[in-house]
Amino acid sequence: MHVQGNILHERLKAHSHTFHKVVDFNPAKEKLVHFDFTNNNKELVEIDLANTEIFSAYVHAKLKNAKAKYGIGGYDENRIFYKRSKLFDAEDSQVSPLHLWRGAGGEGDEGRTLHLGIDIWGEEGTKVYAPLGGMVHSYAFNKNFGDYGATLILLHQLDTVTFYTLYGHLSLDDIARVTEFQYVIRGQVIGHFGKPEENGNWPPHLHFQVIRDMETYKGDYPGVCKFSEQKKYLANCPDPDLILNMMQYVSGE
């Protein structure tokens, strides 16, 4: 891992007990279930993931059957469902540098399938909180099918270390109320799980990602990379659970 990546990892680890919850969750009363979107999940073979209604019904059924409030997981996960949209074709990613997060794709090029954030799957309208203070770095409506949809990125500083948090698949109302450089306080409601037509045509969920260096991106940053670029991107995007502190409560599927 890059030296600066190591420093951020250590800062987040040292302060992990101080972060505000990102979503409402009471481990004493509520349940989390792990969602696996790799080839290991044979259920996905039977699901038309390109159909958002069918995909949403699958997610809802998984939560209901597990009696879980959220499905969660995905960091450093080599996923298979990015074929659901042409947006994810590797060859298409050459068209727009703002969308290098795409998944599996075109012949002759390696698809982008390695997920860099943690997804929290739940009910539309679920509140999203700022885990620590900072300011709005940027926001955008990445509106193509399969994209982030409404996206918010915050800038933070922790013991002199600067980093960013990205919130994908929010509602349009959330980004309509913010401005760049606006201050955000710890525990402030900054978003809600968006509906499919606002969140990139996904079942309602939050994509939460920690980023050390945003480079020149605004309102967007790769959420998925090529498997061959795993080391590079994971060094720049440490485990979001250092902030979430939720994976310890996960039960099996």
Image: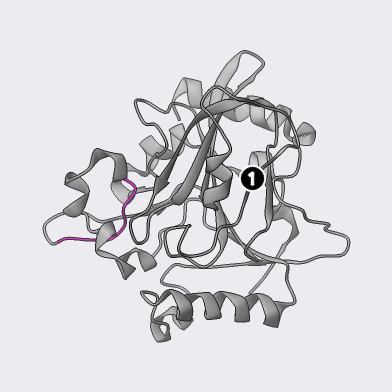
Please rate how many residues cluster around mark 1, counting C-alpha atoms within 10 Å: few if below 14, some from 14 to 19, many from 20. Answer: many
Task: Name the outermost residue toward the right.
Answer: 28
Magenta stretch in the rendered image: 100-106
Question: Which amino acid type is marked by label 1?
Answer: Asp
Q: Is residue 105 magenta?
A: yes
The residue closer to the viewer here, 146 or 139, is 139
Decide: is 81 above or below 111.
Answer: below
Decide: is 70 above or below 110.
Answer: below
Write the residue at 39% across / 53% down: 114
Write the residue at 17% across / 45% down: 94
Q: Which of the 4 image quadrants contains residue 21?
A: top right
Decide: is 58 above or below 236.
Answer: below
Q: Position of residue 51 (x, y in %)?
A: 39, 77
- In this picture, residue 89 sits left or right of residue 179: left
Main SS of the magenta segment?
Answer: loop
Q: Quadrant of the N terminus?
A: top left
Q: Which of the 4 image quadrants contains residue 204?
A: bottom right
> Which residue in the protein does label 1 denote?
241
Q: Which of the 4 image quadrants contains residue 218?
A: top left
Give the color scheme: rainbow, by chain, secondary structure or one colour: one colour
The residue closer to the viewer here, 59 or 235, is 59
Q: Is residue 124 magenta?
A: no
Q: Position of residue 56 (x, y in %)?
A: 52, 75
Q: Position of residue 184 (x, y in %)?
A: 67, 28
The residue closer to the viewer here, 97 or 232, is 97
Q: Quadrant of the C terminus?
A: bottom right
Q: Position of residue 148 (x, y in %)?
A: 43, 51
Helix, strand or loop at label 1? It is helix
**Count of labels in the image:** 1
- In this picture, residue 114 sits left or right of residue 55: left
Decide: is 135 above or below 244.
Answer: above
